Amino acid sequence: MRKASTADADSEVRQARQVRSLAREVAAIAALLPGVLLAATLCFGAPADPSQIPSIFRPQSTPANSILHLSLLVLAITGAIFAVVFSLLAYSVRKFRQRDGDDGREPAQVYGSNQVELAWTVIPILIVLVLFLATARVIHSIQDAPKPAGAIEVIAIGHQFWWEFRYPTLGVVTANELHVPASNPANSTPTFLTLLSADTDHSFWVPQLAGKTDLIPNRSNHIWIDPQETGVYLGQCAQYCGTQHAKMLLRVYVDSPQQFDEWVREQKRLWVSNDTVAEGRRIFETTACVNCHAVAGTVADGRFGPDLTHLMSRDTIAAGAAPNTRENLRAWIEQPDSIKPGSLMPAMQLNEKDLEALTDYLETLR
Amino acid sequence: MSSESIALGTVIESARPIGERLHDWVVTVDHKKLGILYILYALFFLVVAGIEAIIMRIQLIVPHNHFVSPQTFNRMMTMHGTTMIFFMVMPILFGFGTYLIPLMIGARDMAFPRLNAFSFWMTAFGGLLLYFSFIGGNGLYGAGTAPDVGWWAYAPLTSRAFSVGHSTDFWTLALLVSGIGSIGAGVNFIATILCMRCPGMTLGKMPLLAWLNLVVGGMVIFCISPLTAAQIMLCIDRYLGGHFFDTQAGGSAVLWMHFFWIFGHPEVYILVVPAFAFVSEIVPVFSRKPIFGYPIMVAATIAIGFISFSVWAHHMFTVGMSAYGNSFFVFTTVAIAVPTGIKIFNWLGTMWGGKILLRVPMLFCIGFLFQFLIAGLTGIMLGTAPFNWQLSGSYFVVAHFHYVIVGGIVFALFGAFYYWYPKMSGRMCNETLGKWHFWLFLIGFHLTFDFMHIPGILGMPRRIYTYEPGRGWELWNLIVTIGAFFQAAAILVFVVNLLWSLRKGEPAGNDPWDAWTLEWSTSSPPPDYDFATTPVVRSRRPLWDLKHPEDPDWKYE
Amino acid sequence: MSSAAYTRTTAEPEWVLPSRGRVGMFSLIGAESAVFTIFVVAYIFYIGKSVAGPTPADVLELPILSTICLLSSSLTIHLAVRALHQAKVGAFGLWWFVTMALGTIFLVSTGREWHHLIYDKGLTVSTNLFGTTYYSLVGLHAFHVTVGLLIIALAMVFTLFRKVKPEHGERAEVFSLYWHFVDVVWVIVFTVVYIIGR
Ligand code: HEA
Ligand code: HEA
Ligand code: CUA
Ligand SMILES: [Cu+2]
């Protein structure tokens, strides 16, 4: 350390006043930012249906819940660090700013201080340890959770721009809309998913149910969820997978156990032949459709595109890109690019009549 | 002597035919000219990649917008990211390093002037290759033009099966070529700083900028080369039919991720450490105090350099590593907060008790400190793996890294521009325009990137060209887009300021900031040979010693 | 103010700095070793992961002779550099030539090995993962040998035209660092490819 050049001539009163106004300013700025964010979040939640907002702050399943708890801890710690360091910064800019009428002399030349530097090395080390231990606990509790007997098994396969879901034990195959039973603490029926990919990387992310995990070719990953409230939870693919990564949406239907059993029963039904749509069926089976799509109980057994056996049981088509209505189906078959430009289904160049018949046929796939 | 000789210099310069002058710049091996070339080249790409960002933002202003097609959006996204990282921030930092290091260590040039020119032209050529893809990228019908695989280009999206045409070829070649240039620059930085210091400048007396760039040099040679190796493999896959990343033939997609991030994470510190270097030079001068805790600043930087090689998999928390793997990378990731925090606190310590002059360079540095603090803390949130499982791949990540890169690095860069512009051009930057630039950019920055965190928390993934209405994302995207336009306006002001001040700015003189390092002892702009006589130093602040002969620094160090 | 104010006034101990040639070469070697590390890691990672044959055990033979040649060339280049430092230009030329010859033998035998693998065993880069990683790693090393040999050949030409002087000892020494590095890499490649990987 070196000698001080001159002591500042500020009077005590002025200093006190300054400190007070400074404190007010700091508080105002510090409150402003999160305040604005919070207020905006709250009032903006309103116009949209809150249940449609896949916010990580409204978890509905154990993994998402334990993540939220950890997150709040991390937010509190980082928030406190921010408050302290920001106040120091604001204070020094205010306090040590060169004033008008400065005497032009250089301030005391200080080169450092071992004690202070030690302090601001050791304190962060302690914080880091706390953060690490808290995090490691949550990692293990989520990743190494045992699989209970009543667990539902699902294989989720990512395809360029749509999801395939297979229930190996239940013998059900579906696409884009995952159905799982609600789990309750007394009779826990969590769903364990095995994540695979047919082409590029994807990521399974339904924020309210669990953190995301990637679907990677040549590799199998695992996650589990145990939602307790019935309802629809929204998510979407969170790993860039090509042109239509944006429209690889994901819906998880959490059904009551009875609804779920009912749904499984429906899904296992084969297609019942229906003469009124024989023409549509003929077109479907003679056009390339069958190369890519399966309809159980018919010759169609393609696996490149979604299984269409129970197409009409789904609320949306093309991975949530459009509601499942007759017009949309027709538009989709006529020109998939009109709904999802870049999707891997080709336009089949059908004429009006065939298109109608084909759509009629698809509408019987319930 | 300065203003006269500059005027004279300009007259002589303009008397020579333009072709000859251009030729001088093209064949130059002078570190100052190459530095300026790097900087101009990078500024050009800042505007190009900025316009790409604006295009993305316009597309995202409302849900289901039809401003551009998904293919175009993905290309803009990839080109924006690649350009900004490899052809904007890296070259501009190398440019400042090339310009300043010899001047600050009292040398006449870099250790290998011709290698220096080679590095610059390789980088430049890489950028041209990347942008040539707009013309040459469509090998097959409908395969499109520019690369659209994202800036990490995860396998197998880059394999020939999923990326037809030549766009990915241009991408990988561009990075291969510019990577070789970067390695050259890294080698040159190290050799210059270790072997060219003027008498008296021991390692402990180098300006922090030299120290930090030494660390950057070390990181460049050890982290760009894995990228180069990975690009060679990708080339082998794409041109020779190899299977490194071909998942059909047993290749591994995760291997590419590891290779990319072993490069990618140290890379972000390569970007930020030179920014730290600027701040470490500017903050002391405008606080009128020496840097607080010089030795520990150096130690912290070296620590950051080392730790940064052990954290890469924090970009891969979602690929399904074991719980132990995840925990390990959580530890290293949060541990890096310690040396980084030391740096922040030492800058605060430097300001504490000083006389802070709020000139434009200092304003930008204060902005840096504020924003880097927040950005680092969001980094900590991302670093705690379970939290990351929610945030990864969402707009929260995008907000985090723009907060560091734009709020931190770009702010420090602008500070550096205002600080060293007088040295490079001989004229001061206009202070009023500078303040406009600062405030506009500050407002634009916060509008854009503060509000970008929120859609991430509400489940909005990144790299999507459009999104569904009704998920609570609309308002935030609107604000973010508006903010981007503020930033554009600010950068416009900046460019105008640079051009205007070149002709009309006040003559700067040798030492306009009353600063302490060697570059201010020579004329502005410095003569070809930098120093008429080789300087000799006895402390970290040679000019302080000179200005305060009664109380020189070397008595205390 | 002029920088003249900094010229040293008092007699101070002499100011010595490391040689930039060496520092530069060591940095380059650092970068190169990172490149090789990545290739070696990829090789090790993919050992035994090929989905179709041939396997290393089927086709690879130990390249003992070429290994001996390459490794001994490290010794000869060292002798050459020492000769130059001692101003024995003739001896330098001799050892330099031997180095070149040994390096060439190595390259030629690698070439023959590849010819054998490609035409007799049907192993190419695109055959399987083994092919891809093998040709890449060995090829990358061979590329470095080639670059080294070109430089050696250039210096040989200068020697023949009597342009090499004892003051070039420093440069020759810096280059020899590179050559030693290439040898060390071969030891690693040899171990990984021909011993562990087989
Ligand atoms: C360019 C500079 C830069 C810098 C400096 C940083 C700094 C940090 N980053 Fe960031 N990061 C990026 C650029 C940068 N990052 C980029 C470009 C990406 C995304 C790439 C892509 O996906 O496209 C990314 C992504 C990224 C991820 C992956 C997100 C994902 O995709 O899932 C993570 C996760 O851990 C992370 C963490 C961190 C951490 C912990 C730091 C730390 O270094 C921060 C340390 C600083 C502080 C903590 C603040 C100051 C410290 C104190 C005041 C002391 C006290 C504090 C404590 C004890 C906590 N970053
Ligand atoms: C150095 C790094 C850097 C910098 C400075 C920036 C700067 C900006 N970035 Fe960028 N960004 C990245 C690196 C960077 N970015 C990376 C690595 C990615 C990831 C890519 C990937 O996912 O692969 C990314 C991704 C990214 C996204 C996400 C894309 C997606 O995931 O879909 C967005 C979206 O808003 C964005 C926006 C912006 C904006 C608005 C700016 C602004 O700050 C830009 C301001 C500059 C200008 C606007 C230019 C100057 C303007 C003029 C001279 C005026 C005239 C021009 C007009 C207005 C037409 N960036
Ligand atoms: Cu699938 Cu993104
Ligand atoms: Cu990182």
Image: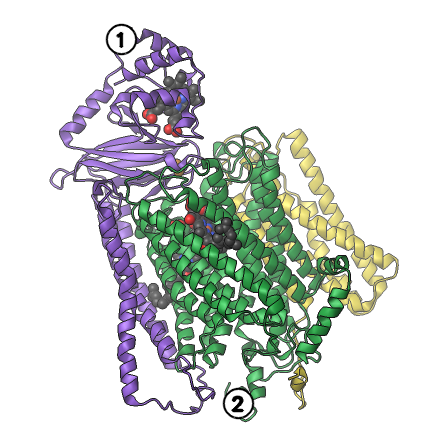
Identify the residue at image location x=56%, y=37%: B145
> What is the quadrant of residue A315 in the picture?
top left
- Report the amino acid beneath label 2: Lys
Name the residue carrying label 2: B555
Tell which residue pokes out farthest to the top in this image. A275
Q: What's the colour of chain C in the image? A: yellow
In the picture shown, does residue A303 fall above or below C76? above
Q: What's the colour of chain A in the image? A: purple
Q: CA distance from mark 1 to mark 2?
A: 100 Å
Name the quarter where the N terminus of chain A is drawn: bottom left
Q: Nearer the viewer, residue A102 or A310?
A: A102
Tell which residue pokes out farthest to the right in this image. C161
- Report the amino acid beneath label 1: Asn
Counting from the top left corner in percent of width and height, residue B26 is at 71, 57
Counting from the top left corner in percent of width and height, residue B200 is at 62, 82
Q: Nearer the viewer, residue A110 or B42?
A: B42
Identify the residue at image location x=69%, y=64%: B112
Identify the residue at image location x=61%, y=83%: B537
Identify the residue at image location x=44%, y=60%: B441
Counting from the top left corner in percent of width and height, residue B141 is at 57, 28
Chain painted green: B
Counting from the top left corner in percent of width and height, residue B107 is at 66, 73
In the picture shown, does residue A274 fall above or below A228? above
- Is residue B252 in view from this perspective? no
> What is the quadrant of residue A154 in the picture?
top left
Residue B289 falls left or right of residue C101: left
Residue B136 falls left or right of residue B258: right
Tell which residue pokes out farthest to the bottom in this image. B550
Name the residue carrying label 1: A274
Residue C197 falls left or right of residue A149: right
Tell which residue pokes out farthest to the front in this image. B504
